[in-house]
Image (cartoon, grey):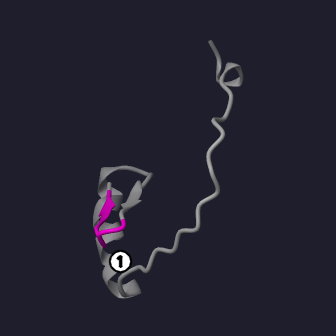
Amino acid sequence: MVLEDFLEPSVQAHDVSVYLPALKTLKSTIERLANLGDQVLVEANLNGKMNLR
């Protein structure tokens, strides 16, 4: 199988807003993660928790 064989799933429209911490805080955190790889996964939930991996 190749990527073109997969169809994008149909999902309902979402109305999502994510309020980020201060840019200075976020920048220093992401700069420390830069040593681990060239991509960052951002996860956030409705309980106010945000994960950067």
Q: Nearer the viewer, residue 22 or 31?
A: 22
- Hey, what amino acid is under mark 1? Leu
Residue placed under numbered mark 1 in the picture: 26
Most distant residue in the top direction = 1
Q: Is residue 29 magenta?
A: no
Q: Which quadrant of the figure contains the C terminus?
A: bottom left
Q: Quadrant of residue 21?
A: bottom left
Q: Residue at x 65, y 17 (%)?
A: 2
Disc 1 crowd, CA 10 A, few/some/many (<14, 14-19, 20+): few
Above or below: residue 3 compared with residue 47? above
Residue 46 in the image: x percent, y percent?
36, 67
Q: Which quadrant of the figure contains the N terminus?
A: top right
Q: Is residue 50 magenta?
A: yes
Magenta range: 46-52
Residue 29 in the image: x percent, y percent?
29, 71
Q: Residue at x 37, y 87 (%)?
A: 22
Q: Residue at x 37, y 77 (%)?
A: 27
Most distant residue in the right direction = 4
Q: Residue at x 44, y 52 (%)?
A: 39
Q: Quadrant of residue 15?
A: bottom right
Q: How many marks?
A: 1
Above or below: residue 23 compared with residue 17? below
Residue 31 in the image: x percent, y percent?
34, 69
Q: Quadrant of residue 43?
A: bottom left
Q: Nearer the viewer, residue 34 or 50?
A: 50
Residue 44 in the image: x percent, y percent?
37, 63
In this picture, residue 6 sits left or right of residue 28: right
Above or below: residue 21 compared with residue 14? below
Q: Nearer the viewer, residue 18 or 39?
A: 18
Q: What SS does tag 1 mark?
A: helix
Above or below: residue 11 compared with residue 1? below
